[in-house]
Amino acid sequence: MTPFNVQLAGLIPTGGGEWVLILLIVLLLFGGTKLPQLAKGLGQSVKEFKKASKEEEAPAKDEAKKPDPTHGAN
């Protein structure tokens, strides 16, 4: 077990009670009217991240399919 895992072992919520406590704290900090806006922003950022990661993979696959014009030209 690495030192990083040891430090985080007590901080990661594992049961339902811990998650309820975290949600109550978030509700108190941001209020009921801000939570939908925060969730929408989080969803949009995840969507954009997935889109950007797919765009990065597509050119790499296209380049792998194209033959190298300098290779095999005699």
Image (spheres, rainbow, N blue to C red):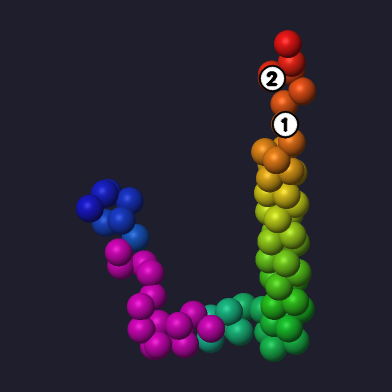
In this view, the residue farthest toward the top is: 74
Residue beneath label 1, please? 67
Image location (x, y in percent) of residue 66: 74, 36
Spatial separation of the CA atoms under disc 1 and disc 2? 8 Å
Left or right relative to 66: residue 9 = left
Tell me if residue 36 comes above or below residue 41 in the rendering: below
Question: Label 1: how many residues lie within 10 Å, few (<14), some (14-19) or many (20+)?
Answer: few
Tag 2: amino acid: His
Q: Secondary structure at mark 1?
A: loop
Q: What segment is highlighted magenta in the picture?
A: 9-23
Left or right relative to 21: residue 39 = right
Q: Please name the residue shown 38% across and 75% down the image.
A: 13
Q: Quadrant of residue 33?
A: bottom right
Question: Label 2: how many residues lie within 10 Å, few (<14), some (14-19) or many (20+)?
Answer: few
Image location (x, y in percent) of residue 26: 58, 79
Q: Secondary structure at mark 2?
A: loop
Q: Which mark is residue 71?
A: 2
Tell me if residue 25 comes above or below residue 8 in the rendering: below
Count of number-bearing discs: 2
Let me know if residue 12 is in the magenta part.
yes
Q: Nearer the viewer, residue 7 or 49?
A: 49
Q: Look at the image and tell me whether residue 38 can be seen.
A: no
Q: Nearer the viewer, residue 70 or 6?
A: 70
Image location (x, y in percent) of residue 34: 74, 81
Q: Please name the residue shown 68% across and 66% down the image.
A: 46
Q: Please name the residue shown 22% across and 53% down the image.
A: 1
Tell me if residue 73 comes above or below residue 52 in the rendering: above
Let me know if residue 32 is in the magenta part.
no
Image location (x, y in percent) of residue 23: 53, 83
Do the numbered discs 1 and 2 sit on residues whose CB atoms are within 8 Å?
yes
**Quarter of the figure that contains the C terminus:** top right
